Amino acid sequence: MTRESTEKTGLVLDSDHLEAFTGGDAGLARDILQTFAEYAPGYLSVLETVSEAEWQPAVHKLKGAARGIGAFALAQAAEMAESLFENPEAAYGDLSNQERRNRCLRDLEDHLRVVLTKIGAQYS
């Protein structure tokens, strides 16, 4: 993560990042956000069923998509989720692997819901 994006991790949706990413093309920004809104829930569905070995690559896709649109808080949550099974006590203490996974999924769902609400309010 760059220093700038680290400073913006609390942002739900960084419109400056999105504008720079799209070259200021509002139509392109809207299309990208609509595509994100369409596909991002599918990333969570995949995470509900993947094995522990498949978890990190699957959550990495969500992280990349979130960073791409400037959803830095969601990207940060996904980054933490990447190491769920490598360093499990770091985020969720001594819960079982299934309980950690469920808690992590709820956290990601909460972040995604906020992003999708922002997209709907700002770009629809």
Image (cartoon, rainbow, N blue to C red):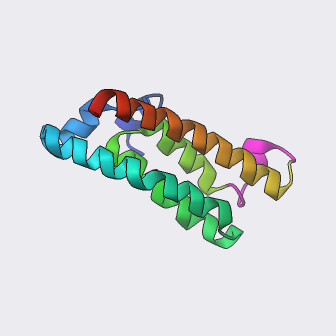
The quadrant holding residue 77 is top right
The quadrant holding residue 4 is top left
Q: Which residue is at the far front?
A: 124
Magenta region, main secondary structure:
loop
Q: Is residue 95 left or right of residue 21?
A: right
Measured from the top left, where is residue 57 in percent x and y?
54, 66
Q: Residue sitting at 74 percent across and 50 percent down?
A: 102
> Where 90 falls versus 6 (above or below)?
below
> Where 95 falls versus 61 (above or below)?
above
Measured from the top left, where is residue 16 in percent x and y?
25, 31
Count how many numbered circles sit on residues in the image: 0
Check residue 45 for magenta coloring. Answer: no
Q: Residue sitting at 60 percent across and 56 percent down?
A: 82
Measured from the top left, where is residue 35 in percent x and y?
32, 52
Quarter occupied by the C terminus: top left
Q: Is residue 7 left or right of residue 31?
A: right
Region of the chain picked out in magenta, as a range: 84-94
- Residue 103 visible here: yes
Question: Between 77 and 115, which is closer to the camera in this rendering?
Answer: 115
Check residue 85 for magenta coloring. Answer: yes
Q: Residue sitting at 60 percent across and 47 percent down?
A: 80
Measured from the top left, where is residue 26 in percent x and y?
15, 37
Question: Between 116 and 10, which is closer to the camera in this rendering?
Answer: 116
